[in-house]
Amino acid sequence: MTESLSMSRQSSEALLYLTDEQLRQGIEAMFFAYRGFTDDPDRILSGMSYGRAHHRAIHFINCAPGTTVNNLLSILGVTKQSLNRVLRTLVNDGLVEARIGQKDRRERHLFLTDEGAQLEHRLSGAQRARMRAAFRQAGPEAVAGFRTVLEAMMDDTLLHHYKGLRDYPT
């Protein structure tokens, strides 16, 4: 047991001293993984004249039904003008519903319509399948490590948003 712990500690310490070449390879892997991760949804959306901004909006509205436009702005880190253009298209096409706030009538709370939920399921289904296959191949320890690395790459604001999605009131 002590030998196993010692070997684990040694391999962890080795990761602290990655070369620039190893880091460059990690960066390249992230780029190509992201490309693969977004390819399937991009193909679905291109036939509808939508792009990744539409996908991100649909995804986060699905994660947090009733989220406000301001909260979505904060999560996505885009300009109000850019988000308004995306939301206007999604609302006009019947994929998103914007409801006036009960407490503050200036707020708009966003919900997917049934059609929007179906599109979100198609888009995320392809990504879930890709992630499931990769996670199965890598194994549970690698999955936990992957999540740890991703969270460590997020600044405090992004990490707050990420963790907040798990307990957003619906």
Image (spheres, rainbow, N blue to C red):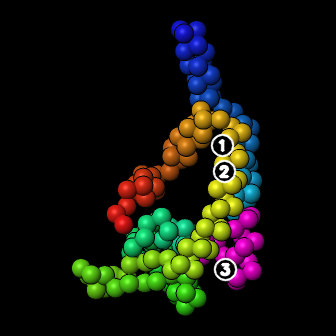
In the displayed image of the protein, which residue is found farthest to the left? 103
Which of the two marks, 3 or 1, is nearer to us in this view?
1
The residue positioned 31% from the left and 85% from the top of the image is 106
Sequence-first tag of 3 and 1: 3
- Residue 42 vs 89, above or below: the answer is above
Mark whose residue sits in front, 3 or 2: 2
Circle 1 is placed at which residue position?
135
Q: Is residue 42 above or below residue 24?
A: below
Report the Cα–Cα distance between label 3 and label 1.
29 Å
Main SS, magenta region, reads helix
Q: Amino acid at mark 1?
A: Phe
Residue 114 placement (x, y as % from top left): 53, 78
Q: Which residue is mark 3?
A: 50
Q: Which residue is mark 2?
A: 131
Q: Amino acid at mark 2?
A: Met
Does residue 43 appear to the left or right of 90 in the view shown?
Answer: right
Residue 48 among those drawn in magenta: yes
| Residue at 75% in and 80% down | 47
